[in-house]
Image: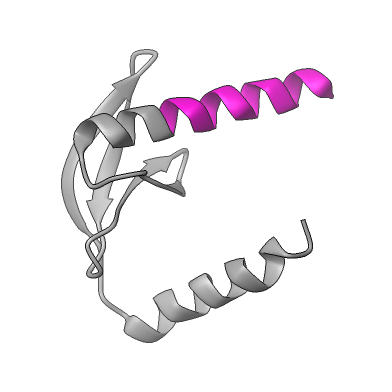
Amino acid sequence: MFRLAPLSFALALSACVTGSKPEPVGSVTVNNVTYPIEALSDGTWRVRVDGKPVVCAHATLEACFWSARHHLTARELLDDLG
């Protein structure tokens, strides 16, 4: 977990430095909830799940669907653990 902290900080810092705004490219629906998809200037896509960005495995709608679904499933499993 401690190894991810510097990487997360570096990614957050680079996002602030570039200053480019992500542009909307579509949305995905998981469990009857729709989540927006954004394209970043470097070509990566991310889906906003409850206001938090989840990076898509590839720049496709299907990849964003599965990234959002896996994120939600992982969050449910963590909630079950207490």
Nearer-the-camera pick, 58 or 29: 58
Q: What stretch is highlighted in magenta?
A: 68-82
* 75 relative to 17, above or below: above
- Report x, y in % for residue 78: 73, 27
Question: Residue most toward the top?
Answer: 31
For the C terminus, the image quarter is top right
Question: Residue most toward the right?
Answer: 82
Q: Is residue 18 left or right of residue 68?
A: left
Which residue: 59% across, 66% down?
8
- Report x, y in % for residue 3: 73, 65
Q: Is residue 52 left or right of residue 66?
A: right
Which residue: 69% across, 21% down?
77
- Report x, y in % for residue 49: 44, 38
Question: Residue most toward the left?
Answer: 25
* Residue 20 forms part of the magenta stretch: no
- Report x, y in % for residue 62: 24, 29
Q: Is residue 21 visible?
A: yes
Question: Residue most toward the bottom?
Answer: 17
- The secondary structure that most of the magenta stretch takes on is helix
* Residue 69 in which image quadrant: top left
Judging from the image, the colouring scheme is: one colour
Q: Is residue 57 left or right of residue 41?
A: right
* Residue 21 in which image quadrant: bottom left
For the N terminus, the image quarter is bottom right
Q: Is residue 35 visible?
A: no
Which residue: 28% across, 57% down?
44
* 2 relative to 33, above or below: below
Q: What count of labels does the image hold?
A: 0
* Residue 73 forms part of the magenta stretch: yes
